[in-house]
């Protein structure tokens, strides 16, 4: 066959570098073209992650055994030789922004598997990627200092090591954790810090900040959210996603399989955060009593921390060493101290559990001495520790925290503020001219725990503090829950809401002259009147005989038992998204504890790919 020249741009050589021209024949396979390119580039490096991208056709040439003729490539084809893994900015449900190296050439489903493997999120089939809500230009208050945590040096291929646990009835894999995290996160203080942020719920921002965030104002707005899901069958590049673009990682399918707190710290935390923000931003409706209970559980999960520089002294025999200053953090019922504030994201010098301790004052107001004497239970007896505070405000908060911790209570306990006031009153009695002031900086702003609608309602009653006693009243029912149990309780109540797990799409049913709403849930489809929001009809998946998509006219047709047939076109989303939701939920229903953790990716694509009718 006659030889001809093929020009290929090599991305690694830079945008200004001229393309490399290689002599080829039409029967040369793609692998042969790549070999010629590498040889002619004369660059010695690992090219194993590189592949050819056909810009005009917006497709990857990944079948290296296919010939140029079979691929339809001629001399004018604009090919680019580029890495298949590129940096992507990823927004998580808890607001954390990561920069990771992800696969741009494989199906999005497989890209999500890689991301979840690195982040230690089991059951990745429940999540997917979607485009973020476009920020309006009027948002000048946007936080320009939004921090981006770079994890591009953490290889996706390293993933997480797993133990196989065998029992008579199950074969399950569990991640091997080192100091509570995957090995690739335990490599440095920087990555350890990120993992802790992934697996611990974040405090809610001020209510003013929540009120400025985007909230769906109507059913149509809620439906538009689901138009932004990426196609799981196609790659990021094929869907116009470029290097360093920003996407969101979210739970897409609301059927959560095999939750285990011991192994699912990140998964549960991100699930909780997605649920919490759905409630705070009114994406899902709930009653006032439910909102107060959600707020009470958040108060349990987002207990305030005390952080400050204090001085510590440990009396020992044969030593004259005095107080030494460290950065202290108080959380739950323990204190940790670090060499400096900057090092507080790593491991502490020591963590002291205060449960069962004795906390006594060592105070002289006139001499400006504010010390806390702690007797810490230890196997050999009681260890003596002194903490020295700078002033009475600092002393009041830390002494109150130590007293609560000695009883096993956290700073979220409703008695914290009264304890602080009691200590301040005691200090005031020692002063000839008391001039104390109240510092409520440690109290939780309860208006951050409810949606703007309920926050506005309570403020309108001209009794701003009335919300706090209502939440504290609900808090008494959950105060004894551990952090894990509180998180699970929050998810349990969320899943019990009437509107839980309903993904909305505006559609036009065949034969109808008006738009309506289709609700897609884990076990049924719901036809909803767009005008009044009433449920018109419900169809369950277990009565479904078949469904298919006419890709030419973009219409979904479904047949149910009893010769019931429906057909509709989609208004706010591509019909592929609806097809993928239905197929995805049917795929989720095939999972069981008896199966291994090996994911049947072939079955998922068969049910969601959209190439053939089921």
Image (tube, helix red, strand yellow):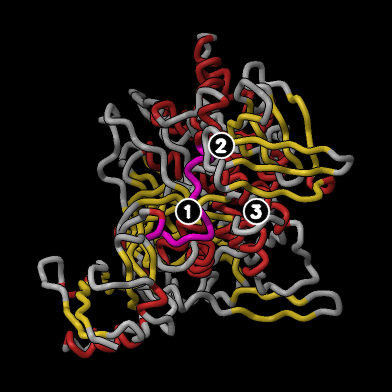
User: Disc 2 designates what residue?
Assistant: 278
Does the segment drawn in magenta span residue 295?
A: no
Which residue lies under the disc numbered 3?
Answer: 484
**Among numbered discs 3 and 1, the one appearing first in the sequence:** 1
Q: Quadrant of residue 435?
A: top left
Q: Magenta segment, which residues?
A: 225-238
Give me the residue at 60% from left, 32% from top: 507
Q: Residue 404, can we see it?
A: no
User: Mark 1 or mark 2, which is nearer the start of the sequence?
Assistant: 2
Q: Residue at x 40, y 62 (%)?
A: 193
Residue nearer the viewer, 283 or 303: 283
Secondary element under disc 2, as helix, strand or loop, is helix
Tag 3, which secondary structure? helix
Disc number for residue 396: none
Decide if residue 241 is on the left or right side of residue 591.
Answer: left
Check the image and name the residue furthest to the front: 1
Answer left or right for 136 relative to 383.
Answer: left
| Residue 562: percent from left, percent from top | 89, 40
Pointer 3 with pointer 2, Cβ within 8 A: no
Between disc 3 and disc 2, whose residue precedes?
2
Looking at the image, residue 206 lies above or below residue 54 = above
Residue at (65, 53) in percent of width and height = 484
Residue at position x 65%, y 35% from top?
568
């Amino acid at each position: 066959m006659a030889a001809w020249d093929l020009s290929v741009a090599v991305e690694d050589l830079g945008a200004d570098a001229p393309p490399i021209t290689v002599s080829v024949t039409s029967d040369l396979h793609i692998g042969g073209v790549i070999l010629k390119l590498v040889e002619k580039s004369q660059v010695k490096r690992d090219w194993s992650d590189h592949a050819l991208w056909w810009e005009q056709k917006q497709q990857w040439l990944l079948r290296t055994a296919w010939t140029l003729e079979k691929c339809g490539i001629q001399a004018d084809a604009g090919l680019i030789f580029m890495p298949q893994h590129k940096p992507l900015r990823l927004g998580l449900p808890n607001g954390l922004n990561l920069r990771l190296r992800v696969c741009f050439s494989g199906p999005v489903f497989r890209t999500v598997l890689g991301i979840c493997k690195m982040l230690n999120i089991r059951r990745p089939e429940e999540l997917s990627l979607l485009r973020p809500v476009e920020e309006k230009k009027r948002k000048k208050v946007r936080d320009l200092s939004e921090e981006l945590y770079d994890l591009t040096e953490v290889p996706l291929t390293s993933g997480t090591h797993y133990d196989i646990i065998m029992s008579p009835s199950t074969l399950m894999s569990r991640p091997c954790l080192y100091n509570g995290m995957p090995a690739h996160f335990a490599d440095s203080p920087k990555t350890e810090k990120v993992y802790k942020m992934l697996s611990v719920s974040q405090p809610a921002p001020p209510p003013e900040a929540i009120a400025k965030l985007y909230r769906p104002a109507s059913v149509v707005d809620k439906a538009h959210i689901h138009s932004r899901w990426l196609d799981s069958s196609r790659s990021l590049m094929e869907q116009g996603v470029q290097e360093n673009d920003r996407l969101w990682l979210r739970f897409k399918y609301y059927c959560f399989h095999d939750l285990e707190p011991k192994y699912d710290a990140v998964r549960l935390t991100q699930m909780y955060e997605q649920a919490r923000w759905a409630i705070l931003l009114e994406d899902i409706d709930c009653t006032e009593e439910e909102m107060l209970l959600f707020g009470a559980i958040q108060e349990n999960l987002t207990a305030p921390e005390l952080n400050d520089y204090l001085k510590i002294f440990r009396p020992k025999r044969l030593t004259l060493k005095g107080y030494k200053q460290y950065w202290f953090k108080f959380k739950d019922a323990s204190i940790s101290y670090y060499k400096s504030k900057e090092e507080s994201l790593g491991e502490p010098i020591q963590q002291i559990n205060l449960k069962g301790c004795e906390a006594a004052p060592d105070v002289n107001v006139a001499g400006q001495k504010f010390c806390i004497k702690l007797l810490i239970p230890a196997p050999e007896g009681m260890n003596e520790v002194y903490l020295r505070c700078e002033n009475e405000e600092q002393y009041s908060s830390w002494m109150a925290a130590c007293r609560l911790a000695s009883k096993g209570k956290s700073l979220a306990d409703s008695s914290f503020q009264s304890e602080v006031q009691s200590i301040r009153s005691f200090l005031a009695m020692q002063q000839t001219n008391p001039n104390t002031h109240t510092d409520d900086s440690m109290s939780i702003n309860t208006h951050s725990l409810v949606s703007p609608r309920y926050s506005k309602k309570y403020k309108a009653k001209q009794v701003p503090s009335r919300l706090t006693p209502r939440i504290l009243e609900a808090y008494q029912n959950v105060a004894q829950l551990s952090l894990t149990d509180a998180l699970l309780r929050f998810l349990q109540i969320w899943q019990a809401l009437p509107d839980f797990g309903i993904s909305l799409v505006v559609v036009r049913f065949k034969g109808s002259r008006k738009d309506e709403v289709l609700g897609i849930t884990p076990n049924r489809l719901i036809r909803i009147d767009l005008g009044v929001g009433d449920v018109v009809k419900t169809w369950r998946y277990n009565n479904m005989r078949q469904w298919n998509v006419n890709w030419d006219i973009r219409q979904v047709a479904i047949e149910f038992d009893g010769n019931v047939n429906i057909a509709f076109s989609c208004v706010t989303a591509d019909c592929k998204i609806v097809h993928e939701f239905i197929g995805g939920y049917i795929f989720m229903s095939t999972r069981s504890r008896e199966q291994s953790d090996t994911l049947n990716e072939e079955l998922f694509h068969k049910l969601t790919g959209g190439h053939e009718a089921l």
